[in-house]
Amino acid sequence: MKKIGVFVCHCGINISSTVDIEAVKEALKNYPGVTHIEDYKYMCSDPGQNLLKERIKEKGLDGVVVAACSPTLHENTFRTAVMLVGMNLYNCEIANIREQCSWVHKDKKVATKKAKLIIKSVVEKALLNEELEPVKVPVTRRAMVVGAGIAGIQAALNIANSGYEVVLVDKNPSIGGRMAQLSETFPTLDCSQCILTPKMVEVSQNKNIKLMTYSEVVDVSGFVGNFKVKIKKKVKYVDWDKCNGCGICIEKCPVTVSSEFNQGVGKRKVIYTPFPQAVPNKPVLDAENCTYFIKGKCQICKKLCPPDAVDYTQVDEFVEEEVGAIVVATGYDTYDISNMEEFGAGKIPDVIDGLTFERLLSSSGPTNGEVRRPSDGKIPKEVVFISCVGSRDPEHHFSYCSKICCMYSAKHAMLYKHRVPDGQPFIFYMDVRTGGKGYEEFYQRAQEEDKVIYLRGKVSKLYREDGKIVVCGIDTLSGKYVELNADMVVLATAIRPSAGVNEFARLLKIHYDENGFLTEAHPKLRPVESLSAGIYLAGCAQAPKDIPDTIAQASGAAAMVANLFASDHLLHEPLIAGVNEDLCSGCGFCVTVCPYDARKLNKEEGIVEVNEVLCEGCGSCSASCPSGAAQQKNFTDTQLVNMVKAILKD
Amino acid sequence: MEKRMTVSSQNFKNEDIQKLEEISEVNVYSCYQCGNCSASCPAFEFMDMPPHQVIRAVQLGFIDEILEANTPWICAACISCTVKCPRGVDIAKLMEGVRQVILRKGIDHLNINEIDKKLREQLPQIALIANFRKTIL
Amino acid sequence: MEISYFPGCTLKTNGRNFEGTALPLLELFDIHAKELDDWYCCGVSFSQSADNLMQQIAPIRTLVKAKESGNTRLLTLCAMCYNTLQRAIFFIKSDEDKRDIIHDFMYREGTKFYGDEVEVVHLLTLLKEIGSEEIKKRVKKKVDEFKIAPYYGCMLLRPKEVAIDSSNAPEIMEEILEAAGCETTYFPFKTECCASYQIVNNSEIVKARTKKIVNSAVKNGADVIVLSCPLCFYNLDEIQIEIKKEDKNFKTIPVLYFTQILALLMGIKSEVNNFSLHYIDPTPVLKRKGLL
Amino acid sequence: MFDPKIIAFYCKWCTSAGADLAGTSRMTYKPNIVGIRVMCSSRVDPEHILDAFKNGADGVLIGGCHPGDCHYESGNYKTQKRITLLKKMINDLGIDKNRLRLEWISAAEGKRFAKVVDEFTDEVQKLGKLKI
Ligand SMILES: Cc1cc2nc3c(=O)[nH]c(=O)nc-3n(C[C@H](O)[C@H](O)[C@H](O)COP(=O)(O)OP(=O)(O)OC[C@H]3O[C@@H](n4cnc5c(N)ncnc54)[C@H](O)[C@@H]3O)c2cc1C
Ligand SMILES: Cc1cc2nc3c(=O)[nH]c(=O)nc-3n(C[C@H](O)[C@H](O)[C@H](O)COP(=O)(O)OP(=O)(O)OC[C@H]3O[C@@H](n4cnc5c(N)ncnc54)[C@H](O)[C@@H]3O)c2cc1C
Ligand code: SF4
Ligand code: SF4
Ligand code: SF4
Ligand code: SF4
Ligand code: SF4
Ligand code: SF4
Ligand code: SF4
Ligand code: SF4
């Protein structure tokens, strides 16, 4: 029998205050296989790890069980430590007596009893663990970035500049995302287009970046280092290889429809680029509104196109890409104001959302940067900005704070005042959140210099009357009921994960939270990784954030990708399921359950063969194998049964 | 209203506060003072203390102010406040609680004989019954 | 089809114009509203204190009567009755412990009530179920440029669990009236409280509320306000006379039950309207629009 | 009161992480359950469950990822199929099928984890000691 050492951690008092360490030691002292038992205040500390290493050498241990916190925290720490003294890392197991014991039970007796059972069962597992070596898997050193807003652009540029190829996919005709729609950006008020466009151009010129706009990922298979991604290139009806971007088609197309890029306030043609600085600067044709597709007549664009690039017969195209890592940067949408019944549910034309206001402020927007209200084009003289619209309202909408709206509302009020010096901006707010470098100063400037009036309270309703919008609320600071006759109202609507991203997350097998934002591997320590190896997160897809935070996270994600690509192979966990050729009857049950096609029936021999690289170690085959031939390494039937017995014995 | 108040944990131990929380089953600590309840209240202008301030007073344990205010008697139990509250505070229920705390001290709020006779005959029954149920025990 | 019907106290007195128009209206759709043999006052205002179970007994007794009537649905017209009965059902369903206490208390009555046995419906919900097509079919008169401001008040919309439509932006009355060929007007005060029973001890609040509500309806071009609650009816109708006394510039507007308009449109004899119960005479405008 | 013994098999990716979250959030739940961490709920062989009952478990809980969220694509569907079948079988063996429970608990659902454990423990407690 193996010689197992058990090390019980106090975790300061996190464990020892509810688990009686001495009693645990006493109970395990004579447990079969346990030849040494010891406790220490902080096992993960340097002295703690040294102690572990010393004892392995000193006592000639063949295996150790560290009874401490969750293995997600320090399994790596301890396994690295034992390896330094020559022990195979699979001989080190963790018994979780903190998260799953000392922290969830108050009664010391009960927690102590449970801790003993947990440790005993893990000792049973350790006794039969095999020494395993990681399986080497080749890495495709090529990345995919999905979503080409500022997050995707930054990540793609960083990865490309580290020397790796990047496939950059966006569902829209142009890259740039929401940032392209913004006017000027807080806290410095530099023009959004001016700082974004150079980056967009850099993307288009970077040889390592393969750009696929107007495209969507439809299928993902494989695993870290070796993903296969199927991409749908949506039909554009323009052959981009031929198109030279002259724009004649756009100019001459006789049909205009409302422009998504301008949030419905401005117009675009049916054959169009979303905005003049679009990258790639080549048009797509929107067949739904095209006269030729509806009535069979027109073809003006085709007739006038110099290189004859317009092609009405084009269809969707599907391509496959192999990549080793994926960065998800699918960004955000804003909560639709039709959900806000008390604010007119989108039926009052002069009640608009923040992105629409950005378009009104933008010098390249539908009003050339003049603030004119949508209903009649008049310049509004009193404008009310309402914050937390849909945010911080767990009863009716979403519980979270959207993080950027306090700042952009201050910015909106300020920019409005700059455009309309005799106008008056008001902001209804509940709290003003300005945690960021220079942000509080920006807020102060809005109040001091631009005389933005802040009213503290939630607006209860608004309605139209005599060409005005009456905004009703309370100012909790003065305790007075407020009625404000505004010319225009701007709602700072909640930031939402972009449409369809949850389906996409399911394709990728990454998680999202109850609000639909993608879940990071650890809320503090691993904020740019998803829980699935090789898939990283950047930007508002993970949580609402402003541009500086977006860029920081995107660079972080790129660094993780570069980190992964630093070697040409990956070490794959060897907890795979083999086959015992003597026992295997060739029934093939395991073949049908394996999700990765790792098992193949060798018809001639009548047994199954396993591809170690493909096996991810789910263990499903082991559970289905009638003869016990398919055993998952270190999770064998005997081990599991012994663990169960150890728990049930007393 | 007092301009100075001593805030102390002793305030919450007040018997009436505890009774109020018991009768109403409302967790006043959910309130983040957005004022939406007050902004939706039809009787706001007539109240000594608007609903959000009543909540605030309960949070801080200033029970006397609440018991003295006309607010609970002006409240029409219209539930506008409750449906608007983003944090799910049932203010209408709290108002009922305040009324009950007072009524159960044996202090009725309404003397039926004081109601104008003509009005009494002319009013729909539901007005009278609803009023009695809120103002006398 | 037969449906059980709970009139409540006021429909037999001040609210005769409501019941008088609603019941014949339903007959047009072959729905016979059968009044419960025996019913109790609903209590009007639902008790909200956690420990006062006594006040829940009255509505529950009525619901038990409804259960015994053999019909699974109980119709209400008065918004307050609707609210109290519906909340009693919600209460019984959501709190088992309190339900048991109430059952213990009612043990002599030999019956229990769990909340699933009867469904309380308001007339508006019923009409919506009947549908625009059926409503259209029964309309006999056509009106032009008759602008109606539907007023919901509180009790049909709050709290959320009993709301017959969206608490913030209900449309159900509009849908029904428009199906009958009326024009409804945008009316931002349609869900605001009229101050309810405060009419008894503080009519000033009601005055202030009515003034706001009526002004808004008038400003938006309404010819009449329609509603579904006898208390709102009184508050919005009678008080306008008082306001007018104080403020000569105040523009009054007739107030009607929505059923009165439907009954007139569907050709039900006008006597059932009991126009004498109205303080602001609606007959001139109804005549002008060809409904009388 | 009767103190049941409950064995749980948690998937490493979801339920075990959910249990960890319940811990980091300092929730409390009934202590009768002891978990065994496996790579995927589909590793759990019906044999292991029967074995647990044979060896004195009064209840067995399996925790897997929500449908569509399995780390291994479809492991949880397989688990579901197996458990459905097994429930029928144990019922025939005279073991109340409610002693076996399959729950989808994600890594974010610490609260749900605690709730499920409490509910299941109550249920097993009501069913009493398992006698085979
Ligand atoms: C009104 C308003 C004003 C703001 N003002 C400022 C400011 O002044 N300063 C500041 O710092 N921040 C500001 N912000 C925040 C800023 O917009 C965001 O921080 C930033 O745009 C986030 O970038 P992103 O790349 O994460 O997301 P996005 O810009 O949303 O980019 C996401 C991209 O992914 C693509 N995509 C989505 N789903 C898919 C899919 N399934 N497949 C392929 N592609 C997909 C989209 O087409 C888009 O191009 C403002 C936000 C708003 C709403
Ligand atoms: C009271 C308090 C509570 C907090 N609680 C939380 C919390 O609950 N959650 C949370 O997310 N964050 C919390 N924070 C914030 C958190 O502490 C910081 O985000 C984090 O520690 C920042 O890490 P850092 O590495 O940037 O800086 P530091 O932790 O300050 O590390 C800087 C290191 O640089 C060394 N150093 C400095 N100058 C030199 C030099 N010239 N040469 C060489 N070495 C140098 C220092 O010795 C130090 O080791 C809290 C902060 C405070 C003050
Ligand atoms: S190993 Fe885990 S349990 Fe022990 S001290 Fe470190 S964090 Fe705490
Ligand atoms: S064919 Fe369609 S896209 Fe081309 S010019 Fe005509 S309407 Fe425009
Ligand atoms: S006219 Fe032809 S070449 Fe010019 S932008 Fe249009 S499609 Fe491209
Ligand atoms: S950032 Fe400000 S406006 Fe936006 S949700 Fe948070 S507190 Fe409200
Ligand atoms: S453990 Fe078995 S079923 Fe799972 S991936 Fe490996 S071979 Fe396939
Ligand atoms: S299930 Fe078992 S016996 Fe059947 S083929 Fe697979 S390994 Fe062989
Ligand atoms: S609406 Fe709710 S959160 Fe806001 S002040 Fe009133 S009770 Fe507090
Ligand atoms: S229930 Fe009372 S406090 Fe609440 S809004 Fe209505 S009148 Fe005001």
Image (cartoon, coloured by chain):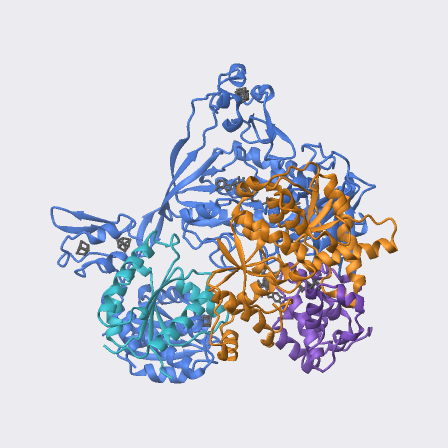
Chain colours: A blue, B purple, C orange, D cyan
Image location (x, y in percent) of residue C7: 60, 61
Q: How many marks?
A: 0
- Above or below, C270 against C205 in this view is above
Q: Is residue A642 visible?
A: no
Q: Is residue A78 left or right of residue C175?
A: left
Q: Nearer the viewer, residue D21 or C233?
A: C233
User: In this rendering, would A420 be left or right of C85?
Assistant: right
Left or right? Give the position of C191 relative to A418: left
Q: Residue at x 45, y 38 (%)?
A: A216
Residue B69 drawn at (x, y percent):
78, 72
Question: Residue D15, image x and y in percent?
Answer: 40, 63
Residue C167 shows up from this direction: yes
Which quadrant, please, contains the C terminus of chain C? top right
* Residue placed most toward the observer, A630 or C99: C99
> Looking at the image, which residue is at 58% across and 72% down?
C58
Quadrant hosting residue A51: bottom left
Residue B49, picture quadrant: bottom right
Q: Position of residue A236 (x, y in %)?
A: 48, 27
Q: Nearer the viewer, residue A633 or B99?
A: B99
Instruction: Residue at 30% x, 82% y: name it.
Output: A650
